[in-house]
Every structure is written in structure tokens, then in C-alpha cells.
Image: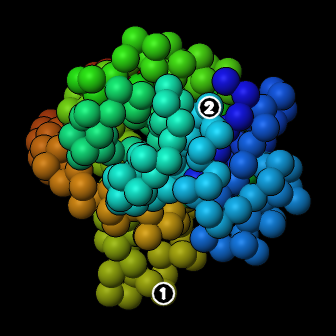
Amino acid sequence: MKRAVIVGMGLMGGSLGLALRRRGWRVTGVGRSLARLKAAKSLGAANEVTTDPEAAVRAADVVVLAVPVDRVVPLGRRLKNFVKPGALVTDVGSIKGSIAKAFADWPHFVGAHPMCGSEKTGVVHARRDLYKGAACVLTPVRTTSSAARRKARLFWSSVGAKTFFLGAGEHDRRVALVSHLPHLLAEALVLTATAGDGKAWAPRVAAGSFRDATRVASADPALWAPIFAMNRTALRRAASDFKRALSNLLKAGPDEKILGDVVRRRALFE
């Protein structure tokens, strides 16, 4: 595996291109804007770029669909008959259930969700070390071959990610809690703090804790609106669990013992 085609040269795709090229891969960047593709090439994220995905994927050993999650399925269906036999096809989407269902008969597709990124978008923010040390959840479909599983693990491990396998449905339930719910809460906090006359006074008195808690609310709405929509059921369940925990905290005080338990649990994430 030494030829990669990355469809979508934004933050995720551009960072992957930088990491792969550093390891000797030949990378073709694909996108819809030639100006953005030229920027990706000038930054070193690709050896060559094109707006023709069908032609690009024919010689690829690995095809990465690094596009917004609502575009993964239609793009994969469009390219399926152009990918060479045995080539690995993977993605970076944060929803896996609908993708796994759509590609259930594709033995060389392995869904992937690298748990990294930023509220910033675009290849100008790409970093070659973005994937280093990041968890990368791999979600093979029911027909995925053992060879494709091995290739997927090798591919994502090669850029420094820590890989493990999960079923698509379990993935969506878990990331609803640790990724999608935090985004939703950050947005709710911004809306709450700036309601009424808060728009005038909140920015003047808010400090680091507010900025830390709401950083991800600056993320691109075009990326996150489809994520919320596509994982609505799991997100609602996660939000219900959160409301229950919040209600219990308010009823209890919370006292020093409860807060101490929270501190110990938070340490698990360090």
C-alpha cells in the first residue's frame, strides 16, 4: 500500500496527506475546488491533485473518503465501480450506522473514525501529527474481508493512530456521549449565556472556563448539522442521561463528596 487517494482535502484529509507523504506514500488529493486543491498541494498535503475522483481512484491502493459525513455514502456509491479490486476504502466520518448499512456488501470497505480534529476547518490548518496518538475506531461491515481488516489497521496505525474495532451501532452510541453531546452542550451554553441582555454583558465577564467549555461551538455548522441529524436517536438518549445527571447534582447540592467523585472520574480522561 503506497498509493493513496484522499477525497476531500480539508483539515482531516490534508493532515492525513501530510502524514502519509512523510512516510513515503504517493498521495493524490481530490476535491471540487481547484484553488483549494492547489493550496493543499503547495502545503505538501498531496503529490498531485484533481477534480476527477473516478479517474483518481483507479490506481489507488487506499481510497479515503474525507468528506462531510452526509456525503460519504453517495460518494462511495459513485466511486465503487472505479476502485481497483482489493483496494482498501475507508472514511473519517463520525457516524457509522448508516454508512455500514449502505456498504454492507463491500468486502474492502472499513469505516474509520479518527477521534481527533479541531473546531478549525480547511487545509490551511492541517498538521502532519494530527493523528499521532489519536484513537481511531474501525467499523468493518458484515462482509469485510480479513485482508481489509488488516490493511485498515495497518493504514491508520502507520500515521500514529491507536486502532480498535467496534460495531457501527455501538460506535454511534458511544460517540454520542463523548463527542456529539459535548458539542451540543457547548452550543446550548452559548445560547443560554447570550440570551436577552447576555449578548452585551456575557463576553465582558466570561473567562477561561467558559471559553474552554464552548470552544467546539465554533465548529463549522455545515459539518455538524448533518452529524446531529444522522445520530439523532443516540444523541437524544445521551442528552436524556445528561439531564438526569444534572438533575441529581442540583438535588444533592452538590457536596464535596460528589465533587470529589467527579474529579476522580475526570482523571480517567487524562
Left or right relative to 138: residue 129 = right
Q: To which residue does mark 2 refer?
A: 61
The location of residue 61, given as percent across then percent down, is 62, 31
The location of residue 47, given as percent across then percent down, is 83, 48
Could you tell me which quadrant the N terminus lies in?
Answer: top right
The location of residue 200, given as percent across then percent down, is 48, 87
Residue at the location (54% across, 19% down)?
Answer: 151
Q: Earlier in the sequence, mark 1 or mark 2?
A: 2
In this rendering, does residue 178 appear at all? yes
Q: Is residue 27 above or below residue 229?
A: above
Q: Is residue 76 above or below residue 221?
A: above
The location of residue 95, given as percent across then percent down, is 32, 45
Left or right relative to 85: residue 166 = left
Residue 160, by quadrant, is: top right
Tell me the tag on residue 225.
none
Residue at the location (39% across, 78% down)?
Answer: 194
Q: Name which residue type carries label 1.
A: Ala
Residue 63, by quadrant, is: top right
Residue at the location (78% across, 38% down)?
Answer: 26
Residue at the location (63% across, 38% down)?
Answer: 60
Front position in the image: 47 or 66: 47
Give the class, few, some or many, for how many residues have Cα within 10 Å of label 1's Cα (few <14, many ≥20).
few
Left or right relative to 221: residue 52 = right
Front position in the image: 12 or 262: 12
Tell me the tag on residue 200.
1
Under tag 1, what secondary structure? helix
Mark 1 touching mark 2, by CB under 8 A?
no
Under tag 2, what secondary structure? loop
Name the front one of labels 1 and 2.
2
